[in-house]
């Protein structure tokens, strides 16, 4: 274990503290460094650790036999001290109906990729929840981007889980991380294709038809031609719908999606997803706001030398993001506390920006994708 002095973190930041905690857990697992976080979710109506955060702590502790203080519902302070390195293997975690399996996957996949072998994760809970990445966003946008940084994650959906029932299940195979050439995603290139996926689980297939038709109609209004795929997805006692637009550019992908509200007209979800896509097109950034903060940790782990690189290769990463978010800024601050890497977030919250990650004192020279 790396060990070292306990890192003190503020959980009351503008992002609400959830991003700070997840990033800290991931980096503590990857480095072995202990941390303590105070003021957890201080700005929320119900501050302190909620069910989602508690399950994240318990799962992370299981991977490294951590000594944990404050892992209780409503606790505003948590101390986390790993007692052994993360080992590759097969792990199962049940997050309950409210737990986001995609967020858990994103917290655990980086340290498992550095553990020296393949691992399998089986996660139960919510797979398609409002306010976070969905399984299909992970599979179609997040995983291809992570692979370009040397972190390969293969995903399988076994059952979709929507609120309030949950009941979803996803499996992931996480491969050992390997070095990749420096990555430059400042420019996205030409829009080649828009993939429209209208998904429904536990509801009439007509919902998917209405979602697809509404999305295609709105896309035509903004001058974008597309075809839609209508998908019934498996579920176990859960019901819901999801519309996802995947924009395929020359050099990258971006995703804009929305969960359908029960009892609401499906066209409302289509309107929200296409409006987000239209905002993406108005700018020139390569990554959507969610992917911008999700790629920060693997880029920083590589820059800090946690992934072995051939002589002469400088693991630098540079990308533009549609909007700098409080989540991105909070994650960047945690990364700086844990890793010996230079991380710069250029731009104001809510505006287009750029992220630069490089080794200490490194020359930020990255190879543009052809």
Image: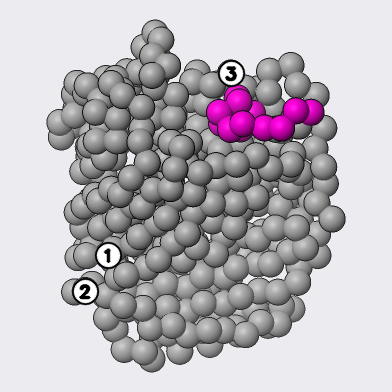
Which residue is under mark 1?
A: 168
Q: Which residues are magenta?
A: 301-312
Q: Which is more toward the observer, 156 or 184?
A: 156
Residue located 26% across and 32% down the image: 61
Q: Is residue 233 above or below residue 115?
A: below
Mark nearest the camera among 3 and 1 is 3
The residue that mark 3 highlights is 340
* 311 in the magenta segment: yes
Q: Is residue 206 above or below residue 281?
A: below
Q: Residue at x 37, y 68 (%)?
A: 157
Mark 1 to mark 2 CA distance (whole Å): 7 Å
Look at 58% across and 33% down and name the residue there: 307
Element type where label 2 sits in the image: loop
Q: Where is mark 2, residue-wise? A: 236
Q: Secondary structure at mark 3?
A: loop
Name above or below for residue 82 compared with residue 310: above
Q: Earlier in the sequence, mark 3 or mark 1?
A: 1
Is residue 189 visible in the rendered image? The answer is: yes
Q: Quadrant of residue 254?
A: bottom right
Q: Is residue 370 left or right of residue 256?
A: right
Residue ID at (71%, 32%): 310
Q: Could you classify mark 2 by the number of other residues whose Cα lies within 10 Å: few (under 14), some (14-19), or many (20 or more)?
A: some
**Which is the main secondary structure of the residues drawn in magenta?**
loop
- Work out which residue is located at the far top of the displayed protein and give it: 5
Residue 69: where, in percent of width, then height? Answer: 19, 21
Q: Secondary structure at mark 1?
A: strand
Residue 273 painted magenta: no
- In depth, the one of 284 and 308 nearer the eye is 308
């Amino acid at each position: 274990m790396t060990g070292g002095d306990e890192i003190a973190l503020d959980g009351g930041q503008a992002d609400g503290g959830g991003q700070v905690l997840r990033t800290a857990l991931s980096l503590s697992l990857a480095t072995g460094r202990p941390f303590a976080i105070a003021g957890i979710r201080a700005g929320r109506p119900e501050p302190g650790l909620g069910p989602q955060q508690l399950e994240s702590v318990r799962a992370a502790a299981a991977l490294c036999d951590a000594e944990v203080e404050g892992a209780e519902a409503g606790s505003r302070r948590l101390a986390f001290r790993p007692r052994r390195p993360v080992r590759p293997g097969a792990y199962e975690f049940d997050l309950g109906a409210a737990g986001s399996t995609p967020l858990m996957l994103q917290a655990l996949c980086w340290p498992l990729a550095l553990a020296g072998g393949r691992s399998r994760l089986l996660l139960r809970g919510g797979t398609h929840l409002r306010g976070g990445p969905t399984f299909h966003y992970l599979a179609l946008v997040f995983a291809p981007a992570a692979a370009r940084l040397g972190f390969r994650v293969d995903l399988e959906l076994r059952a979709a889980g929507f609120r309030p029932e949950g009941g979803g299940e996803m499996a992931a195979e996480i491969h050992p991380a390997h070095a990749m050439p420096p990555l430059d995603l400042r420019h996205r290139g030409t829009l080649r294709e828009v993939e429209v996926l209208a998904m429904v689980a536990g509801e009439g297939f007509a919902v998917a038809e209405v979602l697809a038709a509404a999305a295609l109609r709105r896309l035509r209004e903004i001058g974008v031609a597309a075809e839609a795929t209508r998908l019934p997805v498996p579920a176990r006692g859960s019901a819901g719908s999801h519309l996802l637009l995947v924009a395929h550019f020359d050099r990258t992908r971006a995703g804009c999606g929305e969960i359908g509200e029960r009892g609401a007209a499906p066209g409302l979800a289509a309107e929200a997803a296409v409006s987000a896509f239209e905002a993406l097109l108005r700018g020139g950034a390569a990554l959507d706001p969610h992917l911008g903060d999700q790629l920060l940790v693997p880029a920083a782990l590589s820059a800090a030398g946690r992934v072995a690189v051939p002589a002469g290769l400088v693991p630098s990463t540079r990308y533009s993001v549609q909007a700098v978010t409080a989540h991105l800024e909070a994650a960047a601050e945690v990364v700086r506390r844990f890793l010996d890497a230079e991380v710069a977030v250029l731009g104001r919250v809510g505006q287009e920006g750029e992220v630069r990650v490089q080794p200490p004192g490194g020359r930020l020279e990255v190879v543009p994708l052809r």
